[in-house]
Every structure is written in structure tokens, then in C-alpha cells.
DNA sequence: TCACTTAGTCAATGTCGCTTGACAATTGCG
DNA sequence: CGCAATTGTCAAGCGACATTGACTAAGTGA
């Protein structure tokens, strides 16, 4: 399960901390998801999709 | 996080066991997800979406 | 140079997702 | 009626998700 978080974040010039704050999760969680340590829960994936205004399928990709 | 699993399953006349087999998870997991005990992991949500040929957003709904 | 931000990582902790095995209650069918 | 299939649920266990706090390393700017 890959994801485009880093790119989407860069497009908006947000730090991992900025994104974490908007998602209401810890900065370490954002980092772990970006670096592929684990996948987000489904509810968090929805919050991410809502934040970026994209369908989940456009952010998270089957690897 | 609600979901339409029970309906989608009924449309195909599948038992929880049938669905579990196709998803390669336990019957108890299917039951727990259907009865709202917990949400599936993101990878499992993708497998479910693929199986039914629907986007994740059409199966799982923000509550 | 020095302070600050950012990114990455580690440890410890707690909860969630998923498992196997088991059992009861219900439904459908010969 | 009797039997099988289905659904719902429980307990115990394991690994994944997410947390706080702390630390290192690299880049930016005054």
C-alpha cells in the first residue's frame, strides 16, 4: 500500500507537523504513514481524503 | 463508520462465510465488520472494494 | 556561528484489527 | 420433526495502528 501524502503535502507546502495538526494525529503517525511503516486506519484514510478533497483511491494505491 | 456489506452480500446471496472466503479473512472478521464492532484495515477495505467492483466511498460511509 | 525548523527514528504504552476455537440461537429444508 | 447452515458472540492471543517524549541529523536564515 503506497501513498501520495508526501507529494500532496509538498504541493501545499505543509510540514509533517502541519498535516498532523490538520488530521488531529501525532507528527510521528504522519511520518510513519509517509515512510511506509504502516497504513492508516480506514477512518484516518477518510479524514486524509476529505482534507485533500480526493477519493481514497487517488491517495492510497495498491502495491 | 457505517458500511453496506450486508446489502451487497445479500444482493449476491452470499453467506458471511462465503464473503470471508473470498476476502481471505475469518468469518468472525466479516461478522464484526458488518455488525459495526470495528472498521476493516485499509488494505482489507481495498480488497472489499475490488471484490464488489465499487469505490471504497460507496461501501464505507462516514457516520 | 547560533537558533530554529524539519524530518526521521527509538522506546514504551495502549487500543484496534484479525485470528482460531468454541458455543448458543435462529433459519431453512427434506 | 430433525438436521444443516447461518448468524452472533465470547475468550485468548498476536501483530498493526497510534500515542507521548526524547533524541539525532540536516537545512534555513539572521
Image: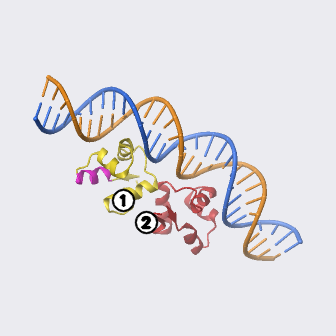
Chain colours: A yellow, B red, C orange, D blue
Output the chain of dot 2. Answer: B
Residue located at (50% from left, 68% from top): B52
Give the labeled residue for mark 1.
A49
**x and y, in percent, of residue B23 in the image:** 55, 60
**x and y, in percent, of residue B40 in the image:** 52, 56
Nearest to the observer: residue D20 or residue D9: D20
- For residue A25, the mark is none
The segment highlighted magenta reads A4-12
**x and y, in percent, of residue A39 in the image:** 43, 49
Marks 1/2 in contact by CB < 8 Å: the verdict is yes
Residue located at (43% from left, 46% from top): A38
Output the chain of dot 1. Answer: A
Is A20 included in the stretch rendered in magenta?
no
The answer to whether residue A29 is left or right of residue A10 is right
- When the figure is inspected, residue D22 is found, relative to residue C18, above or below; the finding is above
Mark 1, Cα crowd under 10 Å, few <14 / some 14-19 / many 20+, is: some
The answer to whether residue C8 is left or right of residue B45 is left
The answer to whether residue C19 is left or right of residue A45 is right
What secondary structure is marked by label 2? helix
What secondary structure is marked by label 1? helix
Disc 1 versus disc 2: distance between alpha carbons?
10 Å
Count of marks placed on residues? 2
- When the figure is inspected, residue A49 is found, relative to residue C26, above or below; the finding is above
Nearest to the observer: residue C15 or residue B39: C15
| Magenta segment main secondary structure | helix
Residue located at (61% from left, 73% from top): B13
Residue located at (64% from left, 62% from top): B17
**x and y, in percent, of residue B58 in the image:** 45, 69
Give the labeled residue for mark 2.
B57
Amino acid at each position: 500500500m503506497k501513498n501520495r501524502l508526501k507529494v500532496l503535502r509538498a504541493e501545499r507546502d505543509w510540514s509533517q507537523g502541519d498535516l498532523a495538526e490538520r488530521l488531529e494525529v501525532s507528527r510521528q503517525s504522519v511520518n510513519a504513514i509517509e515512510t511506509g511503516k504502516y497504513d492508516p486506519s480506514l477512518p484516518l484514510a477518510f479524514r486524509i481524503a476529505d482534507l485533500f478533497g480526493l477519493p481514497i483511491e487517488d491517495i492510497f494505491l495498491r502495491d
